[in-house]
Amino acid sequence: MAQKTGTKETAESMARQQRDISVSEFFLKNRHLLGFDSPRKAIMTTVKEAVDNALDACEEAGQLPEIAVELRQVANGRFVVSVQDNGPGIVRTQIPKVFAKLLYGSKFHRLRMSRGQQGIGISAAGMYGQLTTGAATVILSKTKKSTPAHRQEVQIDTRANKPAVLRNEQVDWRPEFPPEQEDGDPVCYSHGTQVAIEMAAQYVRGRLSVDEYLKQCAVANPHLRLHFKVTLLKKDKATGALQPEEGTWQTYDRAVKTLPPPVEAIQPHPHGVELGLLMQMLKDSRARTLKGALHEDFSRVSVRVAQDICDRAELNPKANPTRVAHREIEALYTAIQDTKLMRPPLDCLAPIGEDQILAGLKKEFPADFYTAVTRSPEVYRGNPFLVEVGVACAKPGENPDLGAEDSVRVMRFANRAPLLYMSGACAMTDAMQAVNWKTYGLAQPRGSLPIGPMAFFLHIASVWVPFTSESKEAIAHYPEILKEMTFALQELGRRLVVYLGRRKRAAEANRKRHYMEMYIPHLALGLQDILALSDKQKKIVETDLSQMLERTHLDV
């Protein structure tokens, strides 16, 4: 019971006010941490989380992804967000936990590249919908052609962070997508998932919208076929009532038909493990000896290296790892840091690749010049990562989306997922601004992005992307990441300046040729009068003058 104002608390009264706080309650009151701080941002975050999960599921199942996103306005300030995929589907018993339990998933404890990491996103979207409209999250899932689909309505018990199933039934459903040709039949699959969440939201087009997120998704995932439709309420002129105005499907077709290479989970690298985590890993180890724990629970630790670490720490390699004392673990930690180890294995990463980056850029950004760079993998805190960059450069006035007098467009990606918000707090933006683009032929105000009709593509792939917050919108400023991003952008700049120089020379040659075409007829006419030349001789003089001046003044 709350104390009266002005009364003093005692230890006993304060103790009676203490209680557990579930993770759901915490994020319910701090939803801005997850990207639900405004109706406009909430709808974008919901689409992002659902599409990321769908892409991960399709790729892990070896299925070329096909995804449909629909936004349907049902009232002023209220939308139903529906996302459907052709993935493997979800087992019926797992549906409530996946969509109505925070911090539940398969990606948090494994070290391999994936879009999702924390097991929060889609459940948080359902919780936001529940909070703002009271509606349940509706899920349809079908795993096989021979089994029926399941439809469930779930909500989160925020006090206990547990799912509550409001409805559970079998239905006749299968994923259906718009046809590949205008007069074709719908594309149907025997498996897939659809999630629908009703929420308080605002749909606005622009650079921070669902439209932009999906376009960038199509660029970074050229193997994806993506559909998007918006149905808005419009006021009927006759009755004044709000009526739905059905939108049309916008489709981003595939540029390639090959999936990203499969990735394998790796063990933690010893140089990326801190002392407290090392203590916990030894306590949880199933190995019988300390030497075996080092070899089996960490990557790049051979039997010989494990023996060497134990010798450096002056510990018995046959000791039980669960019974190693605190002081001994500190000695073990120091020995690990002093031991030279191979870098982590790299089969846990699946870079987009230069060819596919170019395919994605060409598909969505018409331009005159394209190039891309994929750097070799590096390591931060024992976690492997690599950086990729690309650019589409248009001629001034060629692409209306890329203004010649505007700052260049910068698209940021982490594990193939676009990052739209918090660009000013992101290491990628800082690396972009830190490069001296004047050296590479671009105008650049001090401390700002360069200017020109260009779209830059910046991507980091890692087993654990160091986001600055749970909303996964900006990359932390690790020196290793900044260095790699800078090197990649400088290589891009060296290629760009060659193209810009060639374009400048061609423009200068066209300018000179234009002058010749303008003045040579007048010169030939003057020579005809002076030398009394015939019209036929005048034509020959014009041709000879043009050839002579081109050889003299043009770099051709």
Image: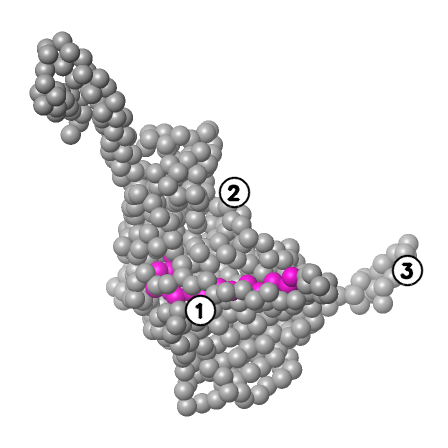
How many C-alpha atoms fall within 10 Å of the one at disc 1: few (<14), some, or many (≥20)? many
Q: Reply above or below: 460 against 253.
A: above
Report the magenta stretch's main SS.
Answer: strand
Residue at which label 3 appears: 4
Identify the residue shown where x is 40% and y is 79%. 189
Say whether residue 383 is magenta: no
- Circles 1 and 2: CB atoms closer than 8 Å: no
Identify the residue shown where x is 48% and y is 89%. 148
**Dot placed on the residue nearer the N-terminal end, 1 or 2:** 1
**Snapshot quadrant of residue 502:** top left
Q: Reply above or below: 181 against 342.
A: below
Q: Which residues are magenta?
A: 220-234
- In this rendering, which labeled residue sits more in front, label 1 or label 2? 1
**Dot placed on the residue nearer the N-terminal end, 3 or 2:** 3
How many C-alpha atoms fall within 10 Å of the one at disc 2: few (<14), some, or many (≥20)? few
Which residue occupies the extreme top position in the image? Answer: 530
Dot 2 amino acid type: Gly
Dot 3 amino acid type: Lys
Residue at which label 1 appears: 67
Dot 1 amino acid type: Ile
